[in-house]
Amino acid sequence: MVFPQVIAVFHALFDAIGLSGNFLVILTIILERRLHKMSYFLLASLAVSDFLCLILVNSFRIASIAEESWLYGQTMCHLNSCFHRYFYVNTILHLLAVSYDRYKAIVKSPLTYDGTVTSPKMLLVLLIWLIPIPLSIGPFLGYGMFVYNPEVYFCENGWVLRSDVLKTRKVFFTVITLLGPFVAILFLNWSVCKTAKRQINALAQEAQLGSLDDSVLNIQQELARRKKERRASFDVFIIIAAFLICFLPLWVVSFCRQYASRIKVSSQMVLLSNGLFFVSSLCNPIIYSIRKKEFRDAVKKMFSRMGLFVKHNENDVIAIGINNLAIGGRIDGRGSTCSYTTTSPELATRLQSYKHYEDSRETTTNFPPSLYAIPEIDGY
């Protein structure tokens, strides 16, 4: 297996993981009402963008890279490159909107922000999907060009600068779609982190100096809310950092091909940088599942409705253990019975206490052991 075929295999893996992961994100946020907040709505919109990017851009490149030739005609080759540019700009605008949402929640309007979805916010999302269109169809209108590159087996931007006008247009496009948005994103997230840290420190000092009354309780509740907001902001920072890591190699390669004509960039490096760009489309579902407990709980709840996931809470563990003991089950050192196992020492202690209770009680009625009364457990 040669290098292009290896790259094609990775592109296929990106499709398999990214499409299923982003579809799960979209479905979960739509079905779970408690996730119907602006922050999650923006993340769902970003998941839609990643989902479509994998279908319209990455999927067409899998077979072409494997066969080492574009298989879908010249028109689709140009459209594929156009979609690549569109979803790149679309993703950057989504990250900018998510950063501004965190900025408004913590810095600009921390007391009035409620995260509800309103008509002006919906208009903002619509603009996120409309703005990349004129920036992407320029080559079809004579501003730039898409050309087929036989070394990488798909179409891309033309890298030959034939005039100062083309150089000016390329610099303008780079500033508008890369430098400007990322400077704004970094500024917004820096302001959020700085303000969140200051607010949390101030609230912590107020809670320590206050007395045990309702005001201190309110301060502690507000402190918990601010910590949750800071964690959400840090999640946004991780998402942005993942996108930067995935895109920067492609940007550096493109810059060298565009402006440093003396530097020869190999086709293998171009394929690698383009492949790494698509990793950003599957990073977000992984980040959500690791960092966001609210999202994980919503996924479990959705699966439980479908009968694919059964959740046992602590009461269920105790009830199952007591029923097993009543019919003659045993408890080992880890707190397991003959039909159920728990690794919680606290639950094992409770079950062991019930076992001692059963051994010491005097039974005067000849009921079957499985019908013994179950004693109440404090705190449950």
Image (tube, grey):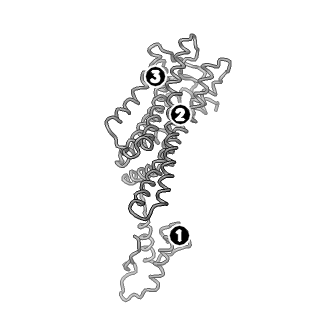
* Residue drawn where x is 64% and y is 27% of the image: 268
Q: Residue furthest top?
A: 163
Quarter of the image containing the C terminus?
bottom left
**Of helix, strand and loop, which one carries label 3?**
helix
The x, y position of residue 179, in whole percent, is: 53, 27
* Mark before the other along the chain sequence, 2 or 1: 2
Q: Is residue 24 visible?
A: no
Which element type, helix, strand or loop, lies under badge 1?
Answer: helix
Mark 2 burial class by Cα count in 10 Å: few <14, some 14-19, many 20+: many
Amino acid marked by disc 1 = Pro
Front residue (pair 282, 104): 104
Number of dots carrying numbers: 3
Q: Amino acid at mark 3?
A: Ser
Q: Give the amino acid at mark 2.
A: Phe
Q: Which residue is mark 1?
A: 345
Q: Are marks 3 and 2 in contact (CB under 8 Å)?
A: no
Q: Are marks 2 and 1 in contact (CB under 8 Å)?
A: no
First in sequence: mark 3 or mark 2? 3
- Return the x and y of residue 180 as percentages of the image width and height: 51, 28
Q: Quadrant of residue 27?
A: top left
Using the image, tell me which numbered label, if any, was put on residue 136: 3
Disc 3 to disc 2, C-alpha distance: 18 Å
Relative to 157, is 342 above or below? below
Q: CA distance from mark 2 to mark 1?
A: 45 Å
The mark found on residue 278 in the picture is 2
**Local crowd at mark 3 within 10 Å, few (<14), some, or many (≥20)?**
many
The crowding category of the residue bearing disc 1, from other C-alpha atoms within 10 Å (few below 14, some 14 to 19, many at least 20), is: few
